[in-house]
Image (tube, rainbow, N blue to C red):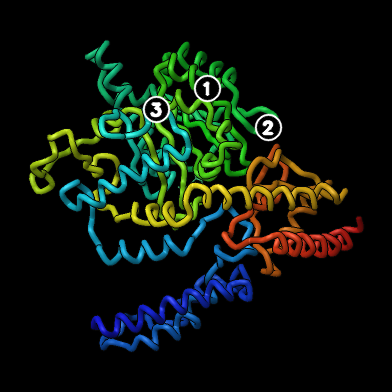
């Protein structure tokens, strides 16, 4: 493909994407394919001779689209959002074109510097305490990780390293392995599975803290567990709080938990993967109160803030904790400005070496939407969730299972789990809308998350009509 053809194909691709978005509602939101469907549709070997562009595009409809779950469809209500926006798409194209790998400042200064400033912009929109911002002379700062899972892992590894140094400072005989074997991390029983996984990867023990009747962790429960573990000779060192849990969007009480972590020399990481985007609105900012006690904080603009995947924004109060934990310095990565104190080398902040120019999509989105545009997007979704909640509450066959604070509604049919299980099965078999379940207090619950940038009130009304029609079928079969 030469540049002339690229210009033509590029325009065609933009049209293809625009048509895809304009007509996305006509596609079943959930695919009707069996495992292994794709292998039989394409050759078993890569082509020896070049093929034509037209052939590939034909195969996008024939091979790819039948197996796509349409996350950007306004009828997609599963998981949490993975908001895509047109400005971010264009910025991503530019990022791909520049194609720099910005692991050090010198590897592409714009890539590094825009990222630091974008994380400051975003931190200010969230009213994060000043200590998390890089500014020109701050101790903190932000970094774009690929996912919230990576941010959790990074924070856990940094906390582990900090703790080993602290313990060895007062007992230099103790070997790292002995300390590891006594270290205990904590998180909510409602926390995302990535927290437990991070502990597995780091080779440390983790305890799940029971939650209250709103599915949130309270200070006294953590305190009790920490005291017990200390009495048994263990070393509590890390707590991962969740703001907006995956099953029900519950908020751990970080104003109570933070002081306990600070007193006990425990690193507090705050995972607000989904809910974090809402803090750009002043009316939801109180949910972030207590963040001043945290060592690190992360949320995913790629979930709910219109910045396409992947973009997970992580801040640390003291960046030396992160950078100091994993420093290796081969000659081929050195550059003459690295010790100047004026530059950031993001390779020390993350697990991989390579990194894309992801801050470009933040820059485009923040400038084209403005803080106000981002706020209206969040408010619109919360209003739609409230609309769905009212429809559920008005139908006595259903119950709401957790307080609706943001864009997630947890609900179920009253009675045995099997009713809600059958309802969800029917919903996903019909493929008109897509939902996933969760478990709350041991019961099977349906999660309705407002996800797409283009979801409107009529989609909510239509989804509810569809759910009630299927409910009728479920209850008829069950003789209710
Ligand atoms: N934490 C919470 C609270 C989540 O809800 C999720 C995903 O939904 C994650 C972490 C994992 O996010 P990621 O895919 O960015 O690792």
Residue 364, located in which quarter of the rendered image? bottom left
At x 50%, y 72%, the residue is: 36
At x 63%, y 61%, the residue is: 455
Question: Where is mark 3, residue-wise?
Answer: 295
Dot placed on the residue nearer the N-terminal end, 1 or 2: 2
Position of 171 relative to 345 (above/below): above
Label at residue 241: none
Decide if residue 247 is on the left or right side of residue 140.
right
Dot placed on the residue nearer the N-terminal end, 1 or 3: 1
* Distance Cα–Cα, label 1 vs label 3: 12 Å
- Quadrant placement of the C terminus: bottom right
How packed mark 1 is, by other alpha carbons closer than 10 Å (few <14, some 14-19, many 20 or more), is many
Image x and y of residue 103, in percent: 22, 49
Contact (Cβ within 8 Å) of mark 1 with mark 2: no
Q: Is residue 309 visible?
A: no
Decide if residue 359 is on the left or right side of residue 71.
left
Nearest-to-viewer mark from 2 and 3: 3
How packed mark 3 is, by other alpha carbons closer than 10 Å (few <14, some 14-19, many 20 or more), is many
Q: Secondary structure at mark 2?
A: loop
Q: Secondary structure at mark 1?
A: helix
Label at residue 214: 2
Question: Where is mark 1, residue-wise?
Answer: 257
Total marks shown come to: 3
Image x and y of residue 93, in percent: 35, 66
Q: Nearer the viewer, residue 229 or 93?
A: 93
Contact (Cβ within 8 Å) of mark 1 with mark 3: no
């Amino acid at each position: 493909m030469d540049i002339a053809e690229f210009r033509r194909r590029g325009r065609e691709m933009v049209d293809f994407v625009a048509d895809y978005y304009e007509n996305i509602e006509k596609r079943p939101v959930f695919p009707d394919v069996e495992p292994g469907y794709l292998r039989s549709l394409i050759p078993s070997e890569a082509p020896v001779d070049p093929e034509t562009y037209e052939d590939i595009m034909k195969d996008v409809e024939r091979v790819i689209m039948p197996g796509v779950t349409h996350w950007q469809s306004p009828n997609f209500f599963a998981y949490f959002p993975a908001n895509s926006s047109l400005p971010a798409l264009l910025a991503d194209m530019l990022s791909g074109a520049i194609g720099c790998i910005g692991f050090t400042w010198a590897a592409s200064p714009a890539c590094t510097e825009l990222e630091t400033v974008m994380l400051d912009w975003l931190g200010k929109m969230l009213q994060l305490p000043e200590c998390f911002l890089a500014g020109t002379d701050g101790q903190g700062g932000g970094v774009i990780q690929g996912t919230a899972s990576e941010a959790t892992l990074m924070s856990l590894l940094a906390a582990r390293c900090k703790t080993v140094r602290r313990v060895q400072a007062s007992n230099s005989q103790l070997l790292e392995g002995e300390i590891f074997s006594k270290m205990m991390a904590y998180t909510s029983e409602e926390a995302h599975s990535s927290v437990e996984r991070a502990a597995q990867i780091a080779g440390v023990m983790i305890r799940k803290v029971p939650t209250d009747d709103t599915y949130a962790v309270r200070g006294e429960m953590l305190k009790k567990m920490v005291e017990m573990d200390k009495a048994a000779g263990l070393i509590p060192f890390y707590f991962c709080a969740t703001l907006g849990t995956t099953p029900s969007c519950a908020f751990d009480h970080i104003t109570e938990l933070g002081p306990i972590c600070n007193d006990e020399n425990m690193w507090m990481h705050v995972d607000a993967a989904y809910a974090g985007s809402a803090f750009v609105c002043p009316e939801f900012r109180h949910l972030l109160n207590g963040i001043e006690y945290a060592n690190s904080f992360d949320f995913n603009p790629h979930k709910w803030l219109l910045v396409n995947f992947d973009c997970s924004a992580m801040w640390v109060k003291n960046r030396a904790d992160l950078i100091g934990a994993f420093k290796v310095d081969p000659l081929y990565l050195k550059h003459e400005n690295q010790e100047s104190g004026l530059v950031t080398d993001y390779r020390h902040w993350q697990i991989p070496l390579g990194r894309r120019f992801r801050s470009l999509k933040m820059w485009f989105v923040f400038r084209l939407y403005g803080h106000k545009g981002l706020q209206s997007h969040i408010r619109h979704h919360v209003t739609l969730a409230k609309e769905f909640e009212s429809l559920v509450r008005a139908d006595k066959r259903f119950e709401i299972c957790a307080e609706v604070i943001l864009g997630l509604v947890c609900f179920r049919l009253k009675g045995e789990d099997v009713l809600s299980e059958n309802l969800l099965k029917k919903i996903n078999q019909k493929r008109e809308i897509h939902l996933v379940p969760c478990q709350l207090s041991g019961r099977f619950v349906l999660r309705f998350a407002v996800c797409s940038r283009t979801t409107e009130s009529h989609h909510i009304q239509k989804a509810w009509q569809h759910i009630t029609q299927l409910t009728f079928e479920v209850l008829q079969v069950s003789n209710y």
